[in-house]
Image (cartoon, rainbow, N blue to C red):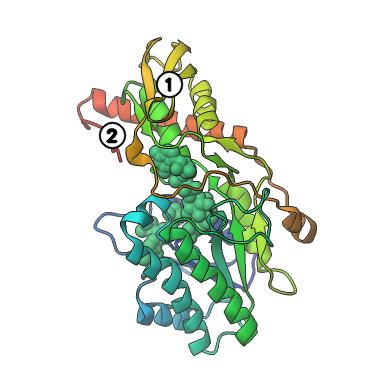
Amino acid sequence: MDNNKVALISGVTGQDGSYLAEFLLEKGYEVHGIKRRASLFNTERIDHIYEDPHNENPKFYLHYGDLTDTSNLTRILQEVQPDEVYNLGAQSHVAVSFESPEYTADVDAIGTLRLLEAIRFLGLEKKTKFYQASTSELYGLVQEIPQKETTPFYPRSPYAVAKMYAYWITVNYRESYGMYACNGILFNHESPRRGETFVTRKITRGIANIALGLESCVYLGNLDALRDWGHAKDYVRMQWLMLQQDAPEDFVIATGKQISVREFVTMSAKVAGIELKFSGEGANEIATVESIDQELAPGVEVGDVIIKVDPRYYRPAEVETLLGDPSKAKSILGWTPEITVEEMCEEMVISDLEKAKQHALLKKHGYIISVAKE
Ligand code: NDP
Ligand code: GDR
């Protein structure tokens, strides 16, 4: 499919950015992404769609940049003249935002302002549509269940507070300057490309490593937290759809179902052939192996304790329960999620088992000593 539209994605090297870039390229867009300078290659999630700039008429371009750098963002926007900007770049880890609150505010809150201001400064406000990656973390301390577009916000972390600024500045630019700018209030979404320190991926990767004898135990924080987990692939489709409407509006994107971290552990272990039994409470809770499928999990024995709670992973203020009501997205955008949490979990564990097998082989032949850990 060919299409004359040009999109710019901040955060193109992240989970959502990589799926969105694939999606837009399939739709025939010319896609530009902003990547940060790093001391190692940081393009693993997009290497399969990378195009050599020496090719004739490439459709995918990468620009060095950073959401903390106004002149850089302005220059990229001026060069690219995008029809659509997807602001997915962020310091996106809630727990890390308590360690680096000022940096998180600079990137997640002021970074959004910088992009909006650059669009306005360049006179692109009537041409360029703007998508802001807003979050269910805005709801924080429960005010209403399920949470919808009209539910009051009560952010519970420096990340969520920064994202609250970004939410309102997006609304403000829409109302002040008539920009097509909107917020997708997305609930948690995961995939095999999810960062390794978010809880789902930490669990699927940890269990896969344990199954193959590369690790012995995964240490987690609050096992009671409830989340409405969807699949990133389903959610990037929505990000695009939100920019294809007659008028800009904000939408909640969620599955409408929630499970606990503990349930996600049980589900993941089952896919890896491990039945678990939880015992103890709070900081003393553990999960012990009850039975195993020897073929899938040769690295484990019945009686092994493979999950332990470590209060190090508790947050200074926790978001206990998130459950979204996606009715507005369903009725206006005609959207329903296609992938269930069970299917997503299976896909993630299988993908991590594959990676663990490769690591086990490398270790056996002395090419690596250990796998990376948080
Ligand atoms: P990731 O953490 O996987 O990706 C974040 C991206 O932002 C990466 O490309 C990262 O670059 C980039 N980035 C970080 N800091 C900067 C900076 N200073 N300047 C430019 N780019 C930067 O997040 P997701 O893909 O999961 O999420 C995408 C967006 O959606 C984020 O804004 C997140 O806050 C938001 N969100 C995510 C949800 C989820 O469940 N996944 C739910 C709701 C909202 P690098 O690769 O170099 O680190
Ligand atoms: P969240 O995702 O904070 O919801 O933010 P995360 O996966 O980090 O935590 C989910 C819940 O699990 C609990 N938890 C742990 N979390 C992590 N990371 N590590 C642990 O060991 C652990 N043990 C228990 C947490 O306390 C929490 O309750 C994600 C990010 O993608 C945000 O950018 C996004 O805005 C929101 O989802 C919606």
In the picture of the structure, the residue carrying the numbered disc 2 is: 371
Q: Is residue 35 visible?
A: no
Q: Amino acid at mark 2?
A: Val
Q: Amino acid at mark 1?
A: Gly
Q: Say whether residue 48 is left or right of residue 347.
A: left
Q: Residue at x 55, y 67 (%)?
A: 132
Q: Residue at x 37, y 70 (%)?
A: 106
The numbered dot on residue 280 is: 1
Determine whether the residue tagged by mark 2 lies in a helix, strand or loop: loop
- Mark 2 or mark 1: name the one nearer the start of the chain: 1
Q: Is mark 2 within 8 Å of ligand 2?
A: no
Number of residues whose C-alpha sits closer than 10 Å to that of mark 1, classed few (under 14), some (14–19) or many (20 or more): few
Q: Is residue 61 above or below residue 254?
A: below
Residue extending farthest right: 331
Determine whether the residue tagged by mark 1 lies in a helix, strand or loop: loop
Q: Say whether residue 60 is left or right of residue 64.
A: right
Q: Is residue 366 above or below residue 4?
A: above
Q: Is residue 74 visible?
A: yes
